[in-house]
Image: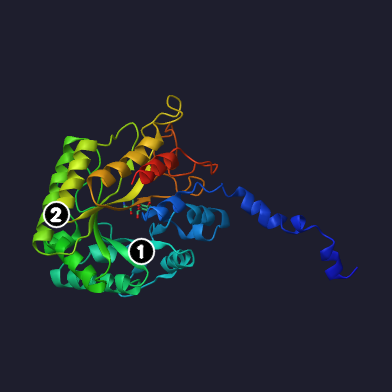
Amino acid sequence: MNRRRFLASIPLALLCAGAGQALAQVPPSAGLRALADRKSFRFGSAIDPEDVGNSIASQMYIDNVNSITPRNQLKWNATEKMPGVFSFGPADQVVGFARRNNMRVYGHTLVWYRTPDWVSAINDAETIRAAMNRHIKQVVGRYKGSIDAWDVVNEPLEYDVPDLRDCVFRRLLGDDYIRMSFDMAHEANPDAMLVLNETHLEKKSDVFEQKRVRILKIVEDLVARKTPIGAVGLQSHFRPGLDRIDPEGMGRFCAALKDMGVGVFITELDASCHFLDRGKVPTPVSYAEVFGDVITIAAERGDLKGATVWGMSEKYGELDEKDTNPGAACTKRVNLYDENNDPRSSIDGIKRAIEAM
Ligand code: 9MR
């Protein structure tokens, strides 16, 4: 039997078995992307380049999101490890995946206190200003046609204190470094939506209320000086057992921004089980509520520009970096799918929130 006859004698199903096997492992689409598209809502996930190269993981993004955020590949310590030496390979991989699958890309992040060592070692104003300008120009300029939103300044406040954080930019340029960063980003891409991204703004506590007040003041000053800020990013990393959403405080905050013509973006939504005891609480709080409520409040009270979860599936996700508790209810941050790629109730909560828009 020649090769052609031999192949023709094999049932098609058998020939496709390899591909079929891979396909069988992709969970059935939860339909989040179709819903988000129908509602013209930007719904995204953080992604790592490894997921792009994994046929099962990548299909889960294709099925669920219309926007992706490269998790680490656009950070300064990834793009310019040595002064003036740029590398964009991993970021290009993610951006290429988005282009092939008709997704938008959200840029994370330009000016953050966690910089490469050579940046934190700078000790005069002119050098740090020039380094910021070159970095922003290169990165934002390179992706002008493909990245349409940027976290320009990330975490300008301390985590648990409502004060501006000490960082090399503020030490050398003063509090005005925030405005300067936005102006540089706007110059590099006048069409991009520019975001100030911060932690804990959606949560209940006196300190977090003071953080909201502090951020509103910063935004007020930016708006008064005609600085092009499009939205405040609410990271929304929840720690079930410790954090509670503050519907009233968060709602008031979103509304105050809207009154100033500034939107909100849920930028890094996920949950960490660090504070839940595996034995006592096998199924932590309802993820449907955690994931759904934060989107609903932002949509009802603010000008919500989009929402991004900080990962797709715990099967491929990184270990929770802060999880030093061996008894914790999970070791990965909770996203949309669990460690077996089974859908979490977070999907139901997000669906409900988008449906209601
Ligand atoms: O999830 C990110 C992790 O892979 C990185 O090691 C870490 C440091 O760059 O950053 C994590 O993402 C953080 C984001 O950039 C800013 N907000 C908090 C996020 C979770 O820690």
For this rendering, which residue is in front, 201 or 319? 201
With respect to residue 59, does 186 lie above or below? below
Q: Residue 260 has which mark?
A: 2
Give the x, y percent position of residue 226. 12, 64
Give the x, y percent position of residue 73. 39, 62
Q: Residues within 10 Å of mark 1 (few under 14, many from 20)?
A: many
Q: Does residue 341 appear to the left or right of 78 in the view shown?
A: right
For this rendering, which residue is in front, 268 or 100? 100
Quarter of the image that includes the N terminus: bottom right
- The residue at the point 17 percent across, 61 percent down is 178
| Name of the residue lying farthest toward the right | 1
Location of residue 274 by image quarter: top left
Give the x, y percent position of residue 321. 38, 46
- The residue at the point 33 percent across, 72 percent down is 144
Q: Does residue 96 appear to the left or right of 235 in the view shown?
A: right
Q: Evaluate whether residue 45 shows in this view.
A: no
Mark 1 against mark 2, which lies toward the viewer?
2
How far is disc 1 from disc 2 in space, using C-alphas? 29 Å
Q: Evaluate whether residue 226 shows in this view.
A: yes
Q: Residue 74 has which mark?
A: 1
Q: Does residue 250 appear to the left or right of 24 in the view shown?
A: left
* Of pointers 1 and 2, the one earlier in the residue sequence: 1
- The residue at the point 26 percent across, 71 percent down is 189
